[in-house]
Amino acid sequence: MDTGLVISEYDDFVARRDYAGGGEFLKLASEAARLEGDLSSELVISNELIGHCRKNDDREGCLEAIGRTIELIALTDSGNEPSAGTAYINIGTGYTRFGEPELAIEYFRKAEEIYSRTLRPRDPRWGGLYNNMATALQETGEYKEAEKLFYKAAKLMSALDKSEDEAVTYVNLAHLTEAAGGRGETIAEYLDRAYYLLNTVRIRGGYYAFVCEKCAPSFIRFGYEEKGNELAERAKKIYETNASKQIRPT
């Protein structure tokens, strides 16, 4: 199975905000891979399903996909490959989302061990590990450790010119500051930096829209309603444009 094509088609669903359709598409693709005995492809799709269910607040679906992904890592003997590290990050992020940060940290440690053996220090996949592990550490009250990892993520994303991901990191730092009882001025500095970074992005496609939509509620939460609403409007316009591109004359 061409998993690259599957993920690309799923991204098209997301780009036009057809999340239900995208989820159904992934489930059908996963089932097709399973029936074909194509476990490697099923692993890729099952891993994608974890993120889909997490983002769409589907706890049961997320935990089911996590269980199957763990099985597939063992069945495909891929536990020492970078792809397994990425799967463990998705698993950990799913557990964090649904209230099990201690369990999540166990999987982030597994990912860290694999990445330390297989990836270069400036590989962008480290950013996903730093950000998501930091979020789990924040949930367990380990604020200083979380802050260190967020800073490492921001530094790496800056070096790689990944402005959207760097912006998300600064929004995460704003929430960490609030959780740790920090100053409002520090929160404002982080949000100002995030907003600046989002304004520097030149190619504004579906991922950019997703990030703007994700960050907007945080701006509103901290009292920056104008900026939050403006980011939400940016995302809306991009989604509408993407949806209109899917319309074909009959």
Image (tube, rainbow, N blue to C red):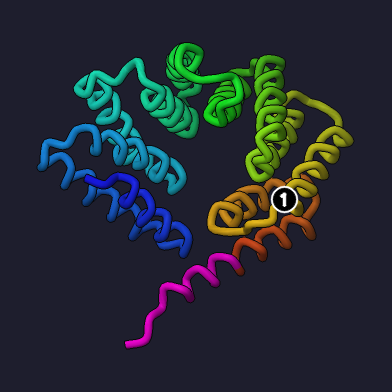
Tell me residue 59's x, y (percent). 37, 39
Q: Give 75 or 203, whichever is nearer the viewer.
A: 203
Q: In the image, 248: left or right of 93?
A: left
- Quadrant, the N terminus: top left
Q: Main secondary structure of the magenta part?
A: helix
Which residue appears farthest toward the front when viewing the image? Answer: 120
Residue at 77 percent of width and 57 percent of height:
227
Q: Is residue 130 magenta?
A: no
Residue at 15 percent of width and 39 percent of height:
34
- Quadrant, the C terminus: bottom left
Q: In the image, 165: left or right of 49?
A: right
- Does any portion of residue 220 appear in the rendered image? no
Tell me residue 176's x, y (percent). 70, 29
Q: Give 219 or 234, whichever is nearer the viewer.
A: 234
Q: Is residue 248 magenta?
A: yes
Residue at 22 percent of width and 23 percent of height:
76
10 Å crowding of disc 1: few (<14), some (14-19), many (20+): many
Q: In the image, 240: left or right of 49?
A: right
- Compared with 145, 159 (above or below) is below
Q: Give 170 or 122, whichever is nearer the viewer.
A: 122
Element at label 1: helix
Look at mark 1 in the image and give the residue it sits on.
Answer: 198
Name the amino acid, label 1: Leu
Tell me residue 16's x, y (percent). 46, 64
- Compared with 235, 169 (above or below) is above
Q: Quadrant of residue 121?
A: top right
Magenta range is: 238-250
Q: Quadrant of residue 71?
A: top left
